[in-house]
Image (cartoon, helix red, strand yellow):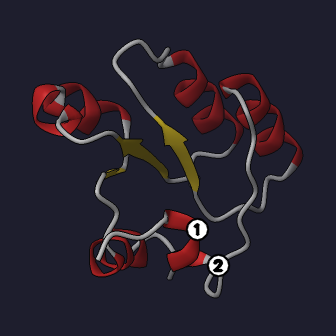
Amino acid sequence: DYIKLEENLKNKVRLHYVDSPEQALEFCNNNKGIDICQLIWHPESESKYNNNILNINQSHPIVALLDRGLKEKNKSYLNKVFDGTISKPFKSEKILKILEGFLQ
C-alpha cells in the first residue's frame, strides 16, 4: 500500500532533487518557474530557507514532507510556515489530494 513519493508523481510533474536546504534555495532562485517546492522537514530545520524561497517568488507553494508523528506535535508551527504537509506513510490518494490544489 505504501509508495515512494516519486513513484506517485513521476508521470504528473518533473521532479528535481537537491541534498540540502542551501541547494534548494539555489535551485529555486535559478528556476523561478517551478510549480511547487517540497522540503523534508524535521524539528531542527531552519525556517530561514523557507522564508528565502518565498522571497524569490511569493507564488511558490512550500510543502513539508514529514516523518510519521511530526505533524501533530508541530501543527501550529507547520501551519504558519508551510502551505501544506505530507506525512509518512505516503499513500497515492493522499499525496494527489494534497498536491492537486497546488498543481492546477
Q: Position of residue 55 (x, y in %)?
A: 64, 32
Alpha carbons under labels 1 and 2: distance apart: 6 Å
Disc 2: which residue: 10
Furthest residue toward front? 1
User: Extreme left residue here?
Assistant: 72
- Kindly state the secondary structure of the residue where label 1 is placed: helix
Which residue occupies 77% across, 62% down? 33
Q: Amino acid at mark 1?
A: Glu
- Residue identifier under label 1: 6
Q: Position of residue 80 (x, y in %)?
A: 27, 32
Does 80 sit left or right of 65 as displayed? left
Instruction: Check the image and report above or below for 87 versus 48.
Output: below
- Residue 17 lies left or right of residue 12; in this view the side is right
Callout 1 environment at 10 Å: few (<14), some (14 to 19), or many (20+)? few
Percent position of residue 13, x then y: 66, 77
Name, please, the residue furthest toward the bottom.
11
Q: Quick check: marks 1 and 2 in contact, CB under 8 Å?
A: yes
Q: Left or right of 9: which side holds 102?
A: left
66 above or below 13? above
Query: Dividing the picture into quarters, in which one does residue 11 lie?
Result: bottom right
Residue 82 vs 16, above or below: the answer is: above
Instruction: State the SS at label 2.
Output: loop
**Compared to 73, does 17 lie above or below?**
below
Q: Residue sitting at 27 percent across and 33 percent down?
A: 78
Q: Amino acid at mark 2?
A: Lys
- Residue 90, quarter of picture: bottom left
Quadrant holding the N terminus: bottom left
Q: Residue at x 38, y 78 (%)?
A: 96
Q: Name the residue located 17 percent from the left edge and 37 percent from the top edge.
A: 69
Q: Residues within 10 Å of mark 2 (few under 14, many from 20)?
A: few
